[in-house]
Image (cartoon, rainbow, N blue to C red):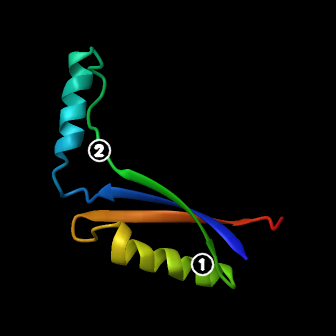
């Protein structure tokens, strides 16, 4: 079975986000004073093959923990959908 995963990785709330702060300052300089907070993260999409949805979830989870996210300073979430076979 083929699956598509969409993974969101964000800095943990207690971690400073210098890129987000710089973006917020830039937005204020452009007149977007309504913007209170900006957090910058990553969006990763990937396709994979697995024998079941449960196994696909395990693969994505392990990929996030071992490579894609630095779990000390980042948190992640993902969604998974099955792709139609051609």
Residue 41 image offset from top left, x and y in percent: 34, 50
Q: In percent of the image, x 36 and y 76: which residue is there?
A: 65
Q: Which residue is mark 1?
A: 56
Residue 37 vs 14, above or below: the answer is above
- Residue in view at x 26 percent, y 15 percent: 30
Q: Position of residue 79 (x, y in %)?
A: 56, 63
Relative placement, left or right, of 41 versus 16 is right
Give the residue displayed 26% in from the left and 32% down from the top: 36
- Which residue occupies the extreme front position in the image? 86
Left or right for 55, reference 12:
right
Task: Identify the residue at the far right of this view.
Answer: 86
- Image vertical order of residue 27 relative to residue 51, above or below: above
> In 3D space, how far apart are the residues under numbered discs 1 and 2 (Cα atoms)?
29 Å
The answer to whether residue 77 is above or below residue 22 is below
Which of the two labelled residues, at mark 1 and mark 2, occupies the earlier sequence position? 2
Residue at 26% from the left image edge and 20% from the top image edge: 33
Q: Residues within 10 Å of mark 2 (few under 14, many from 20)?
A: some
Question: Is 73 placed left or right of 43 in the picture?
Answer: left
Q: Dot 1: what SS?
A: helix
Element on which disc 2 rests: loop
| Residue 39: assigned label | 2
Image: 37 above or below 71:
above
Res. 69 image quadrant: bottom left
Query: Where is the N terminus found, in terms of image quarters?
Result: bottom right
Counting every numbered tag in the picture gives 2
How many other residues sit within 10 Å of disc 1, few (<14), some (14-19) or many (≥20)? many
In which quadrant of the rendered image does the C terminus lie? bottom right
Quarter of the view holding residue 10 = bottom left
């Amino acid at each position: 079975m083929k699956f598509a995963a969409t993974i969101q990785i964000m800095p943990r709330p207690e971690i400073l986000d210098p890129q987000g702060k710089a973006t917020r300052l830039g937005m204020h300089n452009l007149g977007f004073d309504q913007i209170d907070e900006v957090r910058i993260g990553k969006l990763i999409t990937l396709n994979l093959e697995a024998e079941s949805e449960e196994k696909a979830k395990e693969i994505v989870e392990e990929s996030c923990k071992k490579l894609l996210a630095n779990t000390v300073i980042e948190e992640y979430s993902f969604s998974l959908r099955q792709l139609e076979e051609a």
